[in-house]
Amino acid sequence: MVIKVGVTGGIGSGKSTVAKIFAVLGVPVYYADDASKRIMNSDPEVIELITRHFTGEAYKDGKLDRSFLALKVFNNKGNLELLNSLVHPATIRDADRWLSMQQAPYVIKEAALLFESGSYAALDYVIGVSAPYDLRLQRTIARDHSNRDQVMARMNRQIDENIKMKLCDFIVYNDEEQLLIPQVLKLHELFIKESIERNATLRKS
Ligand code: ATP
């Protein structure tokens, strides 16, 4: 039985960075953001829904026009929620399919909106990646070459980080004070140990 572990956190907290460390350890990782981009470009049902709600301009030469869509959802909470509601069900189905095919002791699903989308319910544990607001802001500005106001607007639309972290089973602190790799290694050992114990219990029953 594969243990399913979510990794979540606010924009720029370091979710992908943490997930990549797990991947280096050989753990299969599902990146929900990459998957949703793929799905928006390939799932006929999702393409039809996006076109219906956001017009044919949402696709240019058969490819999702990300800047058009970004303009539609930027500073428009209703449109952002609408877009999420069109894409999330297909992403959750895709992740569930992926999870059911894995055979490792445990797997990671990295997603920004695990709690908001309800998809945390299918997971055994959730790891929250926590970093101070200003550091998240600086990292995201540097990574995306975006301006401060745009990143702050995106950050301020998300659930408060403190609330999110309270919902998590484990917290990884990515605050440039505590080293990331030892924290991930500790969790890796814990999940491997639990997997061994679970399998031993299954064999006995
Ligand atoms: P998003 O929600 O926007 O996708 P994220 O939570 O996945 O963000 P990352 O992409 O992992 O965050 O990290 C944001 C940026 O900060 C990246 O450029 C990453 O390389 C950098 N970063 C993250 N953690 C660290 C760290 N401990 N030291 C140095 N740079 C870091």
Image (cartoon, rainbow, N blue to C red):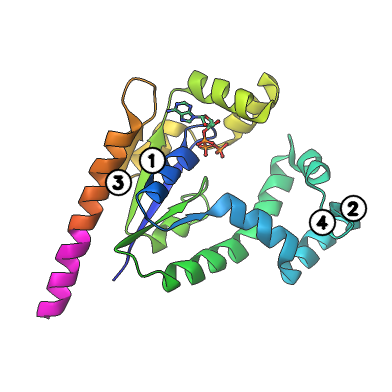
CB of residue at label 2: within 8 Å of ligand 1? no
Nearer the viewer's eye, disc 1 or disc 4? 4
- Secondary structure, mark 2, is helix
- Using the rendered view, name the quadrant where residue 44 is placed: bottom right
Q: Residue 143, image x and y in percent?
A: 61, 29
Q: Earlier in the sequence, mark 2 or mark 4?
A: 2
Q: Earlier in the sequence, mark 1 or mark 3?
A: 1
CB of residue at label 3: within 8 Å of ligand 1? no
Residue 204 falls inside the magenta stretch = yes
The segment highlighted magenta reads: 194-205
Residue 86, visible in the rendered structure: no
- Secondary structure, mark 1, is strand
Q: Residue 48, image x and y in percent?
A: 80, 67
Q: Identify the residue at horizontal 31%, vertical 41% (top origin).
A: 184
Q: Amino acid at mark 3?
A: Asp
Left/right placement of residue 60 relative to residue 30 reads right
Q: Earlier in the sequence, mark 2 or mark 3?
A: 2
Give 176 or 45, whichever is nearer the viewer.
Answer: 176
| Residue at mark 3 | 169
- Secondary structure, mark 3, is loop
Q: Earlier in the sequence, mark 1 or mark 2?
A: 2
Q: Residues within 10 Å of mark 1 (few under 14, many from 20)?
A: many
The Cα–Cα distance between marks 1 and 3, rounded to whole angstroms, is: 8 Å
The Cα–Cα distance between marks 2 and 4, rounded to whole angstroms, is: 10 Å
Decide whether the magenta segment is chiefly helix, strand or loop: helix
What label sits on residue 128 in the rendered view?
1
Left/right placement of residue 124 relative to residue 53 reads left
| Residue at mark 4 | 63
